[in-house]
Image: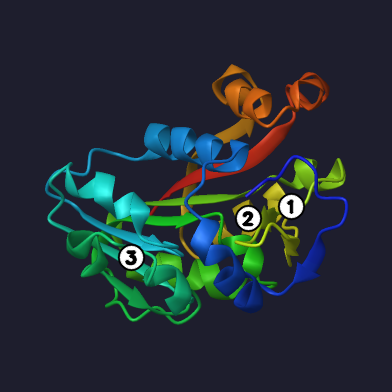
Amino acid sequence: MHEFDVARASTVPAARAYPLWAPTYERDSPVSILDENTVSTLTPKLAGRTLLDVGCGTGRRLRAVLACQPRAAIGIDLALSMLKQNSDPVSRRRTAAGEMRHLPIRDESIDVVWCRLAIGHVPDLTSAYGELARVARPGGAVIVTDFHPDATTAGHRRTFRDANGAAHSVEHFVHPVSSHEAVADRLGLTLTQRIDARVGPVVESLYQTAGRSERYAEQRGLPLVLALRFDS
């Protein structure tokens, strides 16, 4: 979700972007690697628990989750084109189309809720956090990641290349960390952990493979992913 050279990227709304992105979505990027590492740190053990992945994309994260023996694991995404990219029949059966502001999930039914790199697609945090809080069980965990506001301030955008190699920038609404915290608190979610995932050794090889070692030197230490864990 973070290309190294996107000067010519065109900006498109998320609803149009993801059908273009779907064929190449599962390629790793610095943002996806940092997101994976931070969420692994913030997520409690999933064995015997229910998990909901809001904005699950292709559903690829569920493949690893199922190995952790959760009681149930469900993925919801707005883009059918993304869900159709999942070639794994087991995890694919656990995904469905849905909108993060109107989740087709019962109240207080989920132990662990993920909303990963998706909340920046909506201009209003209240509607999104309202649904995340609604479906979380009392005592559950809600884990939200977003493209870091500092990365946007530094001139970075959420970008990708489609199957034809054309660069696109996904429309993104910048939400300050204070806004995440204030909205979540108002809806009964308590912030317990925060990670600012920065460019560093864990993603250096991706820069090298892309022939962008000089970019790595320039960006080292820049936060690309904001990760927040709330308890309900």
Amino acid identity at mark 1: Pro
Q: CA distance from mark 3 to mark 1?
A: 26 Å
Instruction: Say left or right for 148 vs 117.
Output: right
Residue located 82% across and 66% down the image = 10
Residue at numbered disc 1: 176
| Residue 122 in the image: above or below residue 209 | below
Residue 204: x, y in percent? 63, 21
The tag earlier along the polypeptide, 3 or 2, is 3
Amino acid identity at mark 2: His
Instruction: Say left or right for 228 vs 180.
Output: left
| Residue 202 in the image: above or below residue 210 | above
Residue 93: x, y in percent? 21, 70
Instruction: Say left or right for 37 vs 203.
Output: left
* Front-lying residue, 115 or 26: 26
Q: Are marks 2 and 1 in contact (CB under 8 Å)?
A: yes
* Front-lying residue, 189 or 84: 84
User: Which of the numbered marks, if any, corresponds to residue 199?
Assistant: none
Q: Nearer the viewer, mark 3 or mark 2?
A: 3
Q: CA distance from mark 3 to mark 2?
A: 22 Å
Residue at numbered disc 2: 180
Residue 86: x, y in percent? 33, 63
Residue located 35% across and 54% down the image = 60
Quarter occupied by residue 45: top left
Residue at numbered disc 3: 75
Residue, far front:
164
Residue 218: x, y in percent? 83, 23
